[in-house]
Amino acid sequence: MANKNAQPLFLLSTDTLSSYGLDLVFDVAKEAGYDGIDLALWKNFDSWNTSYVKKLVAKHDMPIKIVQISDNVNIKEMHKAIDICEAIWADTITINAPKIFNIKAYTYLSDNLKKLRDEYPHIKFSIINPEDTTLFALPIPKYRFANIVEIIKKHGSYLWLDVSNLDADAFEDDFMRKLAQFVPYTSVVYFSDKTKLGKGHVLPGDGVLKLPAFLKKLKTIGYDRYFSTKLVLDKKDLADGEKVATILTQARDYLKKYFEEVKED
């Protein structure tokens, strides 16, 4: 049950700045006003060094709450993520859904998620809904995490909700109407916008999704877990540290304006 008196933490996904060193990512996140880090394990080589990661958490006084693993997950990557979680007290592991023909990764998750949940009950194992996710049973290939209900019910996983990966019509119609049913199973909201041409992970407000209404409804329901900001930035922006800080601050301010400071009816 969501706690209406609790506030989510607002995290920066290191996936946004994967070309940066991890120390700099922490520094930028702190400057832009984020509460913590969502560590995309496969994106920064230094993120595999558990002792180094612990040092950065202490140096910047900024927690890592989530360890995120790739869509080509295997036993080695999963157990590295678990080791890091145990070392830094992160409580969520998020998994990018395997590509449609990646039978090996799909099978690994299908065979092991329940055992992992039982062995590590303090960790929320969560699957990120893939691009153009729907809610219910469209005809789908066998080896694909293609709809949200399947992710939650069939695999017993928590949901990492990537808003910009939802089919736009499904987001504004079915999903918004049923949002309260999914919040108890949602560990993280991956927050960004989507353009009318379908480009995802753009700055909130620069796309077409009705994000203010979505955030207000989340607050009314009492969502109290994590928001993680992932944006796809141009190379020219990434080369300008001040521009990056400005963009990330804008994303953080958007969440403040339309979630933290929103008055419930």
Image: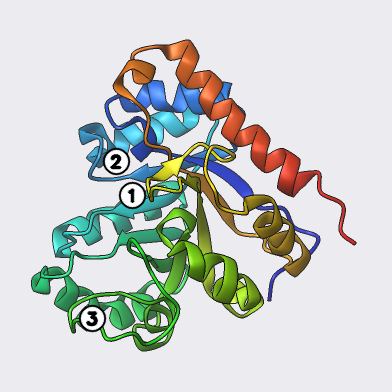
Neighbourhood count class around disc 1 (C-alpha, 10 Å): few under 14, some 14–19, many 20 upward:
many
265 lies left or right of 149: right
Name the spot of residue 196 as percent of width and height, x first: 45, 48
Check disc 2 and report the residue beneath it.
50
State the separation of the CA atoms marked 3 and 2: 27 Å
Q: Earlier in the sequence, mark 3 or mark 2?
A: 2
In front: 198, or 262? 198
Above-or-below relation of 57 to 226: above
Q: Nearer the viewer, mark 3 or mark 1?
A: 3
Quadrant location, the C terminus: bottom right
Locate residue 36 relative to residue 153 in the image: left or right: right
Q: Secondary structure at mark 1?
A: helix
Q: Which residue, given by chain and number where applicable, does mark 3 sit on?
A: 110
Q: Is residue 254 above or below residue 186?
A: above
Whichever of labels 3 and 1 marks the residue nearer the N terminus, that label is 1
* Amino acid carrying mark 2 in the image: Thr
User: Is 108 above or below relative to 198?
Assistant: below
Q: Give the answer, above or below, for where 256 lies relative to 29.
A: below
Residue 259 appears in the figure: yes
Q: Residues within 10 Å of mark 3 (few under 14, many from 20)?
A: some
Sooner in the amino-acid sequence: mark 1 or mark 2: 2
Residue assigned mark 1: 84
The answer to the question of whether label 3 and label 2 lie on touching residues, with beta carbons closer than 8 A, is: no
Q: CB of mark 1 within 8 Å of CB of mark 2?
A: yes
The residue sitting at 25% across, 35% down in the picture is 44
